[in-house]
Image (spheres, grey):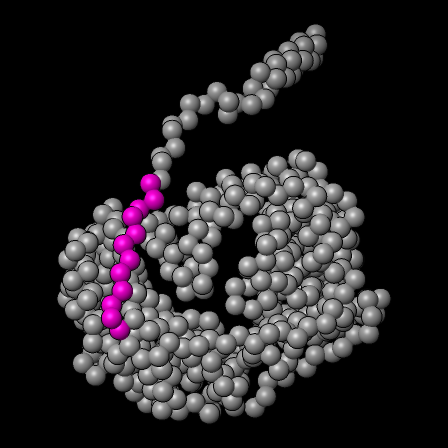
């Protein structure tokens, strides 16, 4: 009798819980959501000095801080082949060595006392110098920033320290499997002699002298190469007067002509292997050359990218990860470069025994994009994902300034982002299949695998002749 009562009670609880679930299938619909705060685009003040320096100012009184960023038209693209790494060393020693008036140690102490930050660096396509400071300290530290920017002393001891740090990085560069794959894939796509796949070596560091740093800096930091952005808590007229006084004496010089050589690429498939005996998984990159940002099909390509690999609901994640269980993470994207062509790259990390299966699964999903139109649900979901993340496009007032400066630096239209939003809304199912057919070449992908040869066996032979890549570090 007691058992019968217990069973009856369990049945009653099951009925009650099922009824509750039915009534609350969408509990979020019962929530009262507060209205979303509107974002008013801040006004951007732009002015230029006679020496060519262009200033971008935006006010933001939320916090008593001021951020200043100098965008410098220079970078690694102008560095000769025998001195690769020079641009990075320049940025490092500019900051660590300081200026004659503010040597590195003195500068560090000054900034620590006032909770301020000054940094400098050069990448492949541009350089930056920045300062973050309390509003009350800006007038005092602005001349310090300008002095470090324009009058670095590049002391020999700090140069040697930077070179030693770079040599240490070279010595460790084969430790990380993903790092090896990314580095070697650049050469697989762009070619060993391309400026877009160059790497720092011991020999190139040995060719760098203090005079090289001085010459690089002298060419880079002139008025015609500088764009200065300032955001934060300040009075507009007062700030403009301070900037004019601080930067007026910088010589105009001549604007650096950044030349980006064309990429000579043939759509030919290939299989490349790096044997790394200390791993038990394969890191796979496969793809081919990509395109440029000014492509009229850019919006459709972005939708295609998200369908292929736009989060957990994307095709690669659903099939390769969830259905087949071949990897924890998998990705793929058609890259569109601003200055030179990007790459179409798919990546997966999988067990050695399932390497070939993972490669076949990825290629299969690329072919599927070409052979089958995406669904109406996929298109709508992808567009929603894109448009719903627009709130993060401007996470701060300074991000508005940074985007405008970046667009002007690259020669892109002022309304580049707004145009993309409009273009995304217009993309159709047919557009996605069209760009997949015209821009993706699953029949001509170049496959790079970094893995354990003894565990991998002959799996890669099914994709073609396997070329081994030697990653021994030149001494």
Q: What is the x, y in percent for residue 296?
A: 59, 54
- Towards the viewer: 274 or 15: 274
Residue at coordinates 40% horizontally, 81% vertically from top-left?
A: 89
Residue at coordinates 82% horizontally, 70% vertically from top-left?
A: 464
- Towards the viewer: 385 or 183: 385
Q: Compared to 12, does 30 lie above or below?
A: below
Residue at coordinates 77% horizontally, 69% vertically from top-left?
A: 269
Q: Residue furthest front?
A: 50
**Image quarter of the N terminus:** top right
Q: Which residues are magenta?
A: 40-51
Total numbered badges shown on the rendered structure: 0
Residue 43 shown in magenta: yes
Residue at coordinates 35% horizontally, 40% vertically from top-left?
A: 39
In the image: residue 462, left or right of residue 103: right
In the image: residue 388, left or right of residue 439: left
Q: What is the x, y in percent for residue 245?
A: 16, 69
Residue 235 shown in magenta: no
In the image: residue 418, left or right of residue 385: left
Q: What is the x, y in percent for residue 334?
A: 63, 58
Q: Is residue 105 visible?
A: no
Q: What is the x, y in percent for residue 168?
A: 48, 81
Q: Is residue 384 visible?
A: yes
């Amino acid at each position: 009798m007691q058992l019968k009562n217990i069973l009856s009670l369990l049945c009653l609880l099951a009925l009650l819980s099922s009824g509750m679930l039915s009534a609350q299938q969408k509990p979020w619909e019962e929530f009262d959501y507060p209205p979303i705060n509107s974002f008013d685009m801040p006004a951007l003040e732009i002015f230029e000095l006679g020496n060519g320096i262009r200033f971008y100012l935006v006010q933001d009184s939320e916090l008593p801080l001021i951020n200043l960023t100098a965008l410098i038209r220079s970078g690694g693209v102008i560095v000769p082949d025998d001195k690769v790494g020079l641009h990075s060393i320049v940025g490092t020693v500019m900051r660590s060595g300081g200026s004659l008036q503010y040597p590195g140690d003195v500068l560090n102490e000054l900034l620590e006392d006032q909770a301020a930050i000054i940094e400098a660096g050069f990448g492949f396509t541009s350089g930056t110098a920045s300062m973050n400071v309390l509003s009350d300290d800006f007038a005092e530290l602005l001349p310090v920033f300008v002095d470090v920017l324009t009058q670095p002393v590049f002391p020999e001891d700090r140069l040697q320290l930077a070179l030693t740090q770079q040599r240490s990085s070279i010595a460790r560069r084969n430790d990380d499997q993903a790092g090896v794959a990314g580095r070697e894939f650049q050469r697989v796509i762009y070619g060993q002699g391309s400026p877009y796949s160059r790497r720092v070596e011991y020999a190139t560091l040995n060719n760098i002298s203090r005079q090289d740093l001085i010459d690089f800096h002298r060419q880079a930091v002139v008025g015609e190469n500088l764009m200065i952005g300032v955001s934060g808590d300040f009075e507009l007229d007062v700030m403009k007067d301070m900037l004019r006084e601080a930067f007026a004496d910088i010589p105009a010089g001549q604007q650096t002509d950044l030349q980006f050589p064309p990429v000579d690429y043939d759509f030919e498939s290939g299989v490349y292997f790096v044997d790394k005996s200390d791993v038990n998984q394969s890191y796979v990159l496969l793809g081919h050359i990509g395109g440029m940002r000014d492509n009229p099909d850019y919006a459709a390509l972005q939708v295609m990218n998200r369908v292929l690999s736009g989060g957990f609901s994307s095709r690669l994640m659903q099939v390769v990860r969830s259905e087949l269980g071949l990897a924890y993470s998998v990705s793929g994207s058609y890259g569109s470069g601003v200055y030179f062509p990007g790459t179409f790259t798919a990546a997966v990390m999988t067990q050695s025994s399932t390497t070939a299966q993972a490669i076949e699964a990825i290629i299969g999903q690329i072919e599927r994009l070409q052979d089958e139109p995406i669904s109406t649900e996929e298109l709508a979901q992808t567009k929603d994902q894109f448009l719903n993340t627009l709130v993060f496009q401007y996470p701060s007032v300074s991000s508005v300034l940074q985007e405008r400066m970046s667009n002007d630096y690259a020669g892109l239209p002022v309304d580049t982002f707004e145009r993309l939003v409009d273009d995304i809304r217009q993309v159709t199912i047919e557009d996605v299949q069209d760009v997949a057919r015209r821009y993706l070449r699953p029949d001509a992908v170049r496959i790079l695998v970094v893995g354990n040869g003894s565990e991998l066996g002959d799996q890669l032979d099914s994709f073609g002749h396997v070329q081994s890549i030697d990653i021994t570090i030149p001494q």
